[in-house]
Image (cartoon, grey):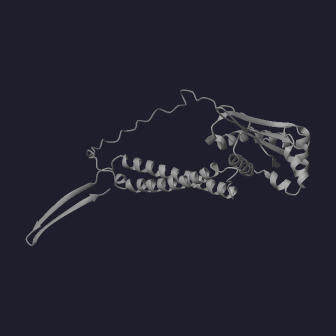
Amino acid sequence: MSVLIAPPDATGAPSHIVEFAQEHLAEQLESRGMRVIRIENVTRKLPVSRRRTLLRCKRTEAPCLQWLGTVSKAEVVLVAELVLGTSGYRAGVRAYAAKDGALISKNLVADVPEDKLLDTLTQTLDVVAPDTQRALRGLPPAPPIDDVPPPTRPAPRPSVQDVPPPTVVAAPPLVETAPVVATKSSARRWAWLPAAGGVALAGVGTVFYLKAKDRYDTLEQATVDAPVRDSKALVSEGKQAQTVSRVTLGLGAAGLIAGAVMFLWPDDPPAQATPSVAVSSGGAMVGLSGTWP
């Protein structure tokens, strides 16, 4: 299914936030197996006058949506909403049928903080994408139902005369076991290894987190008089650093938890060993026999 990501309804949202949101929606749609068409690739082929008219048309009206679908040859027109209010953003997505401009599905969330915008867009897309798929492609085929075997008649219950007398089984003799003496756990001696690895990975994750924040601050400080030269490159670098930071911080936390579990692991069973001494005319001998942990 082909989806055109139209220009969003972004009132009060900074340009770099809009770019992040549009690129995030494209990645999410592609991960769901849909063919994404970006609006910049469509308008690049149009004359300047027609391009301005297309970008300025009202994307909640059917003629504008039909025009977008005809120019892009898409089946669905997806419009994101990023409206900044007093207590946060109103964020979400709307999906329209390109052939007639009819609304298929929408999902909007109010009062979203800026650092939760991408997660909120993903959640709204989890609602809109399946609805759109069902509207254009129908329900998936039902799984085949195996034939149910006919019920079996229960076997007749034996009478008292047919039941054999119970057999008496002698209990095994009791065996005295020696008391177990707790020893130090072998896992506890190596608990520092995953803990040290977790600290190192946490350090790496912090470095990449600071790198992602630096790219974000650069985009945040951009103005009309001092624009960023290559905003797409900064967006890509920031997203990559953010991903590496999340992965390494997660692995670091797992390493610290593993170290704590190994340190608190129960003690190993004691070694079963018996000392022996032998004396002869030529000298003496001392030895140990048994099993070791």
Q: In which quarter of the image is residue 280?
A: bottom left
- Rendered location of residue 9, percent (x, y): 77, 40
Q: Residue at x 57, y 51 (%)?
A: 213
Count of numbered tags: 0
Q: In this view, does 180 lie to the left or right of 249?
A: left
- Rendered location of residue 158, percent (x, y): 58, 29
| Residue at the extreme front of the image, as rendered | 225
- Frontmost residue, 42 versus 259: 42
| Residue at the extreme top of the image, as rendered | 160
| Residue at the extreme bottom of the image, as rendered | 282
Q: In the image, is residue 279 above or below residue 134?
A: below
* Residue 220 seen: yes
Q: Is residue 231 left or right of residue 2?
A: left
- Rendered location of residue 60, percent (x, y): 84, 37
- Frontmost residue, 114 versus 37: 114
Quarter placement of the C terminus: bottom left
* Residue 147 seen: no
- Frontmost residue, 218 versus 21: 218
Q: In this view, does 71 lie to the left or right of 89?
A: right
- Rendered location of residue 173, percent (x, y): 31, 42
Q: In the image, is residue 8 above or below residue 282?
A: above
| Residue at the extreme left of the image, as rendered | 281
Q: Which residue is drawn at 79% across and 42% down?
A: 79
